Image: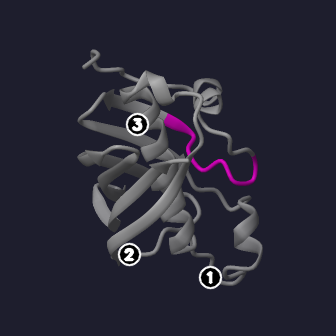
């Protein structure tokens, strides 16, 4: 395993992910321990395009987009952990034990934490948690696949 990495900026993230605005949902990576865990950040602002329709009078970040932010963080983790798949397309292949605990609102900073659980060939399983102010707002077991 490689040494821990204390962060990636948005340009480094864009080198690892194919996603672009408005679907790039990771702003920064704050910590990576390849093969073990990763922590990222999504700053949630009222300017997000999904708030125009979800819900204009009481804006709440859609749960599926919280999961997508976690999945994108997991892709970064896989590509940093295994340099051989850096150029490969990695897709969100499944999720289990999904729970949403609290709403995510404009102005929140979403902390994205994933821990490696299992890898079998081209499938990666990770335990994922999204937090706001140290409180878990969503959690799931995510499965990613090298396409």
What residue is drawn where x is 40% and y is 31%?
30
**Image quadrant in which the N terminus is located:** top left
Q: Which residue is mark 2?
A: 102
Tell me which corner region of the image, top left, top right, bottom left or bottom right, holds residue 140.
bottom left
Q: In the rendered image, is residue 110 in sight?
A: no
Q: CA distance from mark 2 to mark 1?
A: 14 Å
Q: CA distance from mark 3 to mark 2?
A: 25 Å
- Of 30 and 69, the residue lying toward us: 69
Q: Are marks 2 and 1 in contact (CB under 8 Å)?
A: no
The magenta-colored residue range is: 21-28
Mark 2 is surrounded, within 10 Å at the Cα level, by few (under 14), some (14 to 19) or many (20 or more) other residues, namely: some
Labelled disc at residue 58: 1
Q: Is residue 69 above or below residue 138?
A: above
Q: Which residue is mark 3?
A: 77
Q: Main secondary structure of the magenta part?
A: loop
Q: Position of residue 51 (x, y in %)?
A: 70, 71
First in sequence: mark 2 vs mark 1? 1
Q: Is residue 93 magenta?
A: no
First in sequence: mark 3 vs mark 2? 3
Q: Position of residue 59 (x, y in %)?
A: 63, 76
Tell me the mark number nearer the camera, choosing from 2 and 1.
Answer: 2
Q: Are marks 1 and 3 in contact (CB under 8 Å)?
A: no
What residue is drawn where x is 58% and y is 56%?
44
Q: Position of residue 96 (x, y in %)?
A: 33, 72
Whether residue 120 sits left or right of residue 122 in the image: it is left
Q: In the rendered image, is residue 122 in sight?
A: yes
Tell me the mark number nearer the camera, choosing from 3 and 2.
Answer: 3
Mark 3 is surrounded, within 10 Å at the Cα level, by few (under 14), some (14 to 19) or many (20 or more) other residues, namely: many
Q: Is residue 25 above or below residue 6?
A: below
What residue is drawn where x is 33% and y is 76%?
99
């Amino acid at each position: 395993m490689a040494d821990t990495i204390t962060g990636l900026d948005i340009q480094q993230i864009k080198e690892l992910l194919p996603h672009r605005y408005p679907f790039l949902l990771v702003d920064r990576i704050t910590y990576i321990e390849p093969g073990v865990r990763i922590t990222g950040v999504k700053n949630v602002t009222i300017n997000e395009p999904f708030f125009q329709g979800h819900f204009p009078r009481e804006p709440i970040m859609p749960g599926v987009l919280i999961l997508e932010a976690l999945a994108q963080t997991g892709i970064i983790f896989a590509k940093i952990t295994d340099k051989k798949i850096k150029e490969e397309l990695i897709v969100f292949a499944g999720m289990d034990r999904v729970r949403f605990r609290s709403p995510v609102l404009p102005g929140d900073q979403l902390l994205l934490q994933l821990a490696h659980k299992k890898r079998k060939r081209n499938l990666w399983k990770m335990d994922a948690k999204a937090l706001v102010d140290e409180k878990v707002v969503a959690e799931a077991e995510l499965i990613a696949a090298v396409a």
